[in-house]
Amino acid sequence: MTRDWSLDLLFPLIARMPTTLPWSLAGLIGRESVAERARLQRWLEDLFARVFPGATGAQHFQWAKAHLAMLAQEMVDAMAFHRLGRWGGPSITLQGEDHAKSLIRKGQGFILVLNHYDRILTAPVALARAGVATNVLTMPVLDNPELEAPQRRFLLRKIKGYTAVTGGIWHTTSDGLRTVHESLRSGQGWVILADAWRPEFGRLRGHRFLGGSLSLPTGIERLAQSTGVPLLQAVTYSPSPDRLEVNIELLPDNPRQAIDAVVQRLERDVLARPWAWWQWGLWDQMWQPTAEMEGNP
């Protein structure tokens, strides 16, 4: 199975099947070829053994397997946002939506902070079902040289389906932030990922995370500081491929403290469900051991 085939044909085709069967099938089929999936499985097991030495080999195996299945299930989400929380699609239980609704009623813009955790874009879809539209800020797609043509086509199709459901616009960092600033000040909500990471990011801040330091960009806290908007956090949990739970919480008023709280929540979630974090492939770039771990004074 080639990447072109899975992105251009397989997942769009699976996503059109009735009932919630597509999400179960995705976990079995996977995003990769059989050989590539086996290689990734072994690599993840080795990484989990390094990060979580107290867990058993069987746990490392199950986490790696669940991680790859979750990524494949999100591929179906990407082609079927209109089915999430609707008949024939995964159910969504939403808690905390009143935080966003209250801000909208006051004409107050806000930033909805997500992490690359579990089925990440379920929360904005769930909010849209509850009557709260949001915009989304992402990394570049069209002018991203690291994306191959099939990946770019898939992402553009994903973005089209996502914005159709969430009722907002899609904006990238390469387009500048003036639109985002103006929109936040005018009372709109924006979805931004806190644990996005790129090697060229220059403004990073370290956070205590899994016994070391996780370096994350400071863009959200700077944006919140300059616009004066509050921050909300949303986390999605998937007890099963066809059942999704979303929790939305109001974060501290101080943007720096708010992002600290986001990372602390992420650490708790990763400890509880290591397989659900997307960013393991960037672990050695994002995370560094602390001096205490290295045995330094």
Image (cartoon, rainbow, N blue to C red):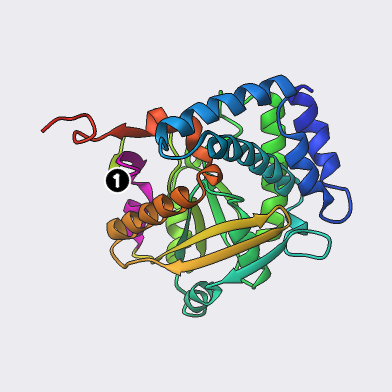
Q: Residue 157: in sight, yes or no? A: yes
Q: Position of residue 123 (x, y in %)?
A: 59, 60
Q: Quadrant of the N terminus?
A: top right
Give whichever of 240, 80 is nearer the camera. 240
Kind of residue indicated by mark 1? His
State whether residue 55 is above or below residue 50.
below
Q: Position of residue 150 (x, y in %)?
A: 72, 27
Which image quarter holds the C terminus? top left
Tell which of 32 and 11 is nearer to you.
32
In the rendered image, residue 197 lying in the magenta stretch gets the answer no
Picture coordinates of residue 178 (x, y %)? 43, 50
Name the residue rendered at 33%, 44% in the picture: 209
The residue nearer to you, when weighing 131 against 12, is 12
Q: Residue furthest left?
A: 297
Q: Is residue 201 visible?
A: no
Magenta includes 221? yes
Identified at 79% across, 32% down, the residue is 8
Residue where numbered disc 1 is placed: 207
In the image, residue 259 lies at what x, y percent?
35, 55
> Is the residue 185 above or below the residue 81 in the image?
below
Q: What range of the chain is rendered magenta?
A: 208-227
In front of the other: 18 or 153: 18
Give the residue furthest to the right: 18
Crowd tier of the residue under label 1, counting other residues whose Cα lies within 10 Å: few below 14, some 14–19, many 20 or above: some
Q: Residue at x 47, y 75 (%)?
A: 103
Secondary structure of the residue carrying tag 1 is strand
Drawn side of residue 171 relative to residue 290, left or right: right
- Which quadrant would residue 245 be assigned to in this image? bottom right
**How many tags in the picture?**
1
